[in-house]
Image (cartoon, helix red, strand yellow):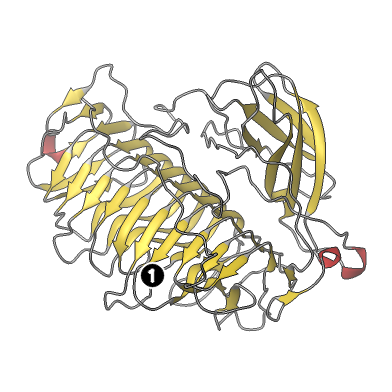
Amino acid sequence: MGWMRAGVWPDANGSGRYRPVTAAVVACVVLAAGASVTLAGGAPVVVEEASLTGVEAGTATCTTDESGFCTVAHRLGTTPAAVVVTLVAPQTGTGPLPSQLAADRYTATGFRLRALTAEGAVYTGPLTVGYAAYPGGSPPPAASVPASSPAVSTSLSRPAPSSPGNGITGGAVPDNAVADCPTGGQLSGAPSGNQFSGHSYNGHGQPLPRGNYTIGSNTCIENYVFDGSNLTLAGSPSNVTIVNNLFQNWPAKQAIANVNGTDITVNFNTIKATAGGAWTGIFGQGAMKNVTIAHNDIQNLGAAVDGIQLRFTGTGTDIEIAYNRISDNGRFPIELQQVAHGLKVHHNYATVRRMGGDQLGQLSIATGNDKDGGGYYDSDTSGVEIAYNIVVNTDGSANPACFESRGNGNVLHDNYCRNYSYVDDYAMTNNSSPNPWFVTNNVLVGPGSGAVSIYEGFNRAGYSFVAPTESGNKRYAMGDPAAPGVPAWNYAAGVQAGTP
């Protein structure tokens, strides 16, 4: 993308889209016996660790090059849907330590690892990591399944939700998210015909005249106040950046509408105070590739509307929804539907309460192959990772499930859910053989006992639903003195003060 900053590493497909990640410096911890596992059909059951299937876990040592990269081999036998990495060594010493880890460029034989220091500098030298490679294909026959133990942390990581001192202190986060537009040749003021097109624009904090605005390809806008106005992406654009703008009292169904196309970034915007008749803060539909929606503050909507809704009706590829704060939501803080490949939903913070809508608040990652109104797409979802999110129900009674999950090969890990009965409800639909999927290391505070996943109750006719492999999840009653409180969430979100 034209506005991307350097200093972090690109996605596995080499697209140049960057997804930096801060990893907790922890030892490679494996799961204890008593994990919940189900491969296909039925509810999750409790089995011993030796029965845990599908995940290939191990340790590896390599020496990073001058850019912080090295290649690690795995023995999964197929290209993983996700790779979870944790640091084993070095963890102490007088020199710089590799405290930020990420894995990408997955193949059937290995993956690329990159290591940075806590300050974001390249780490060059030897290191040992623990890894868990999650399969994206059908599970092997039961007779040939090896025992394995996924690691506790991840390439999308911060400290586990149950540990103290979560989050990063201060207003900024070291993830190099796009936070401004190019200054060369930058225009200001209201665009001609309410159309932002082909330039970099800076509103310098001034309100635009009320109306409906559009934004086209190769355009970046920052520091505008849309008061009584909304913004729509024109057609199916490419190279669009919407950053550090305020949207309030918007007159249409969405504040930012028609998100679709290629290389689209929507970061650090504040969206608040709907004007009535609103459906969604940020809405998108169609084919999407390399789309990032991060660090937005969708606050106090006070209505039964969605915070962020994307419908991948033309397939979504390499989509990231991260570091968003969505407060006082009455429906789905995040709702994602249809077929996606390489979807990462991580480090979001949401509070919900009942507001008389048609849904009880949860993060809905309903990315299966079922179409709205009936029928099915020909392709299946793959590479969906849902991690390190915090979801809090502020009502007096619990909601059923914190997440809705559909699609092949999903991985839900290290999320914190409060005042819910389950981590997730699910209805897995697919065209091909059922893929295993995983619910691991989540913290659930609320009523109930046993498995943290529950079948949603409907599925594609003629197909058996696939229950998740559960492991490492922790349940606590609301009144349990041992129940962890809501983790600190100190990431920057919304319009950043001091921008010109």
Residue 39 in percent (x, y) is at: 75, 71
Where is the C terminus found, in terms of image quarters? Answer: top left
Q: Is residue 244 above or below residue 184?
A: below
Q: Is residue 458 above or below residue 452?
A: below
Residue 363 in percent (x, y) is at: 44, 63
Quarter of the image for residue 94 reads top right
**Residue tagged by mark 1?**
361
Q: Is residue 61 above or below residue 237?
A: above
Q: How many marks?
A: 1
Quarter of the image for residue 93 reads top right
Circle 1 crowding by C-alpha within 10 Å: few under 14, some 14–19, many from 20: many
Identified by mark 1, the residue type is Gly
Q: Which residue is most to the left? A: 209
Q: Is residue 203 above or below residue 293?
A: above
Residue 381 in percent (x, y) is at: 59, 60
Q: Which residue is most to the front? A: 481
Residue 382 relative to residue 218: left or right: right
Please tell me which residue lies in front, 396 or 209: 396
Residue 324 relative to residue 51: left or right: left
Residue 488 in percent (x, y) is at: 43, 49
Residue 179 relative to residue 344: left or right: left
Taking the spot 76% from the left edge, 52% from the top edge, the residue there is: 30
Quarter of the image for residue 97 reads top right
Residue 358 relative to residue 278: left or right: right
Please tell me which residue lies in front, 481 or 468: 481
Label 1 SS? loop
Where is the N terminus found, in terms of image quarters? Answer: top left
Please tell me which residue lies in front, 397 or 376: 397
Taking the spot 30% from the left edge, 36% from the top edge, the residue there is: 243
Q: Which residue is most to the right? A: 143
